[in-house]
Amino acid sequence: MKRRERGFTLIELLVVITILTIGLLGISGLFVAGSVSAAKSERMNLARNLALKEMERLRSAGFSGCTVNPDIFASSEGYQILQQNPDGTGEVSFSTPNLPPGSQGLIEISHYQSGAGYYPNLKDIVVTVTWPGGGVTGGRVVLHTLIANRP
């Protein structure tokens, strides 16, 4: 009998290459998932900052400044009045820079209503920022507050 020569057979090399390929494909899937998660996180952070900016603008304006009219929401500043009611309530859209095309910012101003009744001295403010995305990268941020008319 001859002594076996040292080294790997072709079959052993093919098995090792197959195992390495499967492992590398699994790891590359993690990189894809990580980049999708990072993109969604970045968009969510941008949308949250835009919504916070609008909410703080309305809070600092106070009860009387939370009125849907062109003097407060000027089109030159990126606002568009979608609905304007006689009592100063309604809906206003705002621009969403740095978010994907098709993104939308929306401010809804109404008087607070509950099961106990209608409160004309309490405004209900909802600021929503939505953005499109394929699959899991789209999303929405919603902020909600009440602003009272203090004498």
Image (cartoon, grey):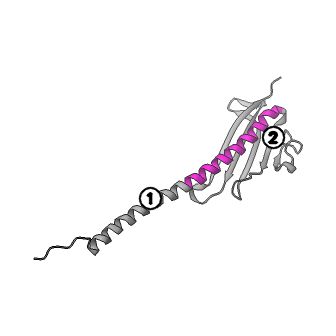
Q: What element carries label 1?
A: helix
Image position, residue 110 (x, y; %): 77, 39
- Report the quarter where the N terminus lies: bottom left
Q: Is 18 situated above or below 94?
A: below
- Reading the chain from its start, which is encountered first: label 2 or label 1? 1
Say which amino acid is labelled 2. Answer: Thr
Which disc is residue 27 wearing? 1
Q: Which residue is drawn at 14% across and 73% down?
A: 3
Query: Where's residue 47, x and y in %?
Result: 68, 47
Q: Do the residues labelled 2 and 1 touch (CB within 8 Å)?
A: no
Q: Which amino acid does label 1 sit on?
A: Ile
Q: Is mark 2 on a helix, strand or loop?
A: loop
Residue 74 to residue 12: above or below: above
Residue under the image location 76 percent in, 41 percent down: 54
Q: In which quarter of the image is residue 151?
A: top right
Q: Residue 90's spot in the image, x, y percent?
A: 80, 44
What residue is drawn where x is 81% and y is 32%?
63
Main secondary structure of the magenta stretch:
helix
The residue lying at 63 percent from left, 48 percent from top is: 44
Q: Which residues fall within the magenta stretch?
A: 36-63
Horizontal side of 150 relative to 20 (left or right) equals: right
Q: How far apart are marks 2 and 1 (CA)?
A: 53 Å
Q: Is residue 125 left or right of residue 78?
A: left
Q: Residue 2's mark?
A: none
Q: Which of 58 and 40 is in front in this view?
A: 40
- Pick out the residue farthest to the left: 1
Q: Name the residue under label 2.
A: 89
Most foreground residue, 134 or 20 = 20
Q: Is residue 31 left or right of residue 126?
A: left
Say above or below: 43 vs 143: below
